[in-house]
Amino acid sequence: MTSLPSVVIIGGGLAGCEAAWQLVKRGLRVRLFEMKPTRFSPAHTSANLAELVCSNSFRASSISNAAGLLKEEMRRLDSITMLAADKTTVPAGRALAVDRQRFSQTVEEYLTEKKPLFELIRKEVTTLPEERPLLIASGPLTSDALTEALKKMLRQDYLYFYDAISPLVFAETIDYSHAFWASRYDEGADYLNLPLDEKQYDRFWRALVEADQVPPHPFEEQRYFEGCLPIEVMAKRGRDTLRFGPMKPVGLKEPTTGRRPFAVVQLRRENVEGSLFNMVGFQTRLRWKEQEKVFRLIPGLDKAEFARYGSIHRNTFINSPSLLTRSLALRHEEGIFFAGQITGVEGYIESAAMGLLAGLSIIFYLRRQDFVPPPPTTAMGALLQYITKANKKEFQPMNVNFGLFPPLDGNVPARERGHIYARRALDELEKWKGKVWSVLEG
């Protein structure tokens, strides 16, 4: 296999390193471009590959949690991220946390041991290389020059620079006795509406304006678009601002009274199965615990469980459902692949997982065989399906969560659900691995 052409990778973060590992360990040559230390993004400080910028936590360890399950799947596929993480752990209760410096050093050591197959080129990429295959894993803080090159290739409409995300609620945790289905002005019934009377609204509004926010990173200007203001910013403009914005009751009538509610929160289905609901217009910078506390004051959400919390931060990501196949290949340009946060996944392990799949996919591409993606019953497959099959018009980055998985059969008690998802996922992963490994090792 060493006679095959070099694979060019842009980006030495988790996704780029993970893809490189999957390739070099199977005898392929990789040229990985990383602009550090020649140039640092506003968020990076270390010259090491696979730098962990925001936190040293890889989140939950238990496989009954979707994040823990994703890590276990990656271990079974010989992930360099998990090899390094398990070697550099620090105490963190039920979470997997690592010594940040040692983790990055370990990833880099594993890769540099693969020389001469692995070549690290410390240089900023400002124009897209002509070599193919090419993997772009430049992350959410892609440099301005590379961003301009991507905009040209992808057509500008398909590149996003700001991430305004509303919370997602598990459908089964909503109290439907406080809700009604309707669209404004009787135009269908596409939204689940949670009405508030004046007293309920005032209690919610006061809690919202007093809630604690996540401060912006030093590299983020606190500059918002009027069309996607954080809900707490709107609330601080005045008591009734939300009632003329995302919580406006205009065009809606409560079925029980026939009257317009004082205010309303609208929920929209996030997926075909209807297992997740998006809180429309509720993008926020509130801390996660504050989001739980404040949003559970909304009638119908008092016992809500959140699959994703709201956030607003700088992010560069592509509209993957419009652009990528399930092999993470670009539809309209031969031999170009994407991985990591730029594809619309959120989080360290999610980024690394997409890098792992991109590396495997490139091997299939070089062998002129169709890549077989993991089934959506697995954590990796569920994430891959989301970023390539989600609604193109409303696509937003996503963490792994069980709401992305095909639903379980029958009524399963909540305390058992995670374990059943995990058993099903790992069984399906092993079957898939058997088929894919026969090609990779053949």
Image: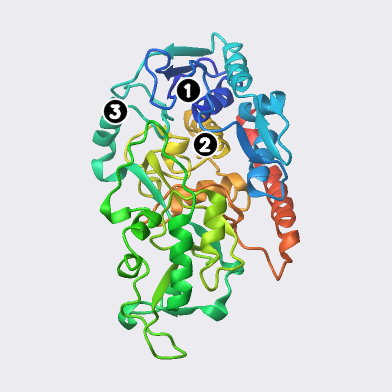
Callout 1 secondary element: loop
Give the image location of residue 320, x and y in percent.
40, 45
Q: Which mark is residue 284?
A: none
The residue that disc 3 covers is 144
The residue that disc 2 covers is 351
Amino acid type, callout 3: Asp
Residue at image coords 56%, 9% = 115
Mark 3 burial class by Cα count in 10 Å: few <14, some 14-19, many 20+: few
Amino acid type, callout 1: Gly
Asked if residue 223 lies left or right of residue 412, the reply is left
Residue at image coords 68%, 34% = 75
Give the image location of residue 214, x and y in percent.
47, 44
Q: Which mark is residue 12?
A: 1
3 vs 2, front mark: 3
Callout 2 secondary element: helix
What is the distance, in whole Å, between disc 1 and disc 3 at their CAs?
Answer: 17 Å
